[in-house]
Image (cartoon, rainbow, N blue to C red):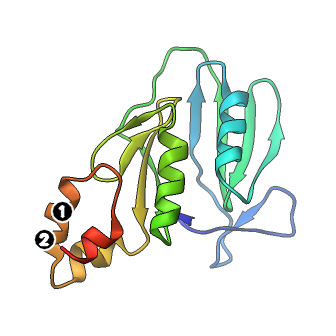
Amino acid sequence: MSFFITNLILSSKVNELINPYGMKQMMYPCLWFAGNATEAVDFYISIFRDSRILSANSLVTFLEIKGQKFMALNGRPDFDPNQASSLVIECTSQDEIDQYWEAITKEGEESMCGWCKDKYGFSWQIIPENIEKLLFQSANAERAVQAMMGMKKIDIAALENA
């Protein structure tokens, strides 16, 4: 499993994230929560192995999930997340897709084409790591796209056999 942005590795410097090309991570998402950021961080850490809190206070928590840095902000209920932005999880197997789908949608919502929302309203795309090959580079790419349009959770075998 990896996040779509890039895989990152922790450098020897505390709280400095370095990507595989040796560049410091200069951008990371800030997720706005309506006063329940600590609860949300605990939820995300329970879902993703290789995750940890980097630092925290009553306003902000910095966390790392699979090498990707995030900021969780304890804000006021002025803003709600929407589907204009989503977090993409590339999975290496159907089992991994199933695991993340179940965990994220447990108190959230299922949508179409691998999209779902967690219980905090944040949108996720849970997709196979070879999604580009399946949908753009294979001989049956057009049929795979049509098959995906009828799915909620992605079924890798169905895309491969379309």
Dot 2, how many residues are within 10 Å of its Cα: few (below 14), some (14-19), or many (20+)? some
The three-letter amino acid code for the residue at tag 1 is Ala
Asked whether the viewer can see residue 31, the reply is yes
Q: Residue at x 38, y 75 (%)?
A: 130
Percent coordinates x, y for residue 47 in the rendering: 64, 48
Task: Tell me: 105 left or right of 31.
Answer: left
- Asked which secondary structure carries label 1, the reply is helix
Q: Is residue 147 above or below residue 20?
A: above
Q: Is residue 153 above or below residue 92?
A: above
Q: CB of mark 1 within 8 Å of CB of mark 2? A: yes
Q: Is residue 4 visible?
A: no
Location of residue 6 in the rendering, given as x and y in whole percent from the top left corner: 55, 67
24 lies left or right of 133:
right
Give coordinates of residue 158: x percent, y percent: 26, 69
Q: Which label belongs to residue 147?
A: 1
Helix, strand or loop status at disc 2: helix
Q: Residue extending furthest top?
A: 77
Q: Residue 68 falls in which quadrant of the image? A: bottom right
Identify the residue under disc 2: 143
Say left or right for 134 vs 76.
Answer: left
- In the rendered image, residue 148, in percent from the top left (x then y), is placed at 23, 60
Name the residue type under label 2.
Arg
- The residue positioned 30% from the left and 79% from the top of the image is 133
Tell me the distance, in whole angstroms, between the alpha carbons under discs 1 and 2. 6 Å
Nearer the observer, 3 or 144:
144
Of residue 14 and residue 110, the one placed in the foreground of this image is 110
The quadrant where residue 143 appears: bottom left
Q: Which mark is residue 87?
A: none
| Image quadrant where one finds the N terminus | bottom right
Position of residue 20 relative to residue 14, above or below, is below
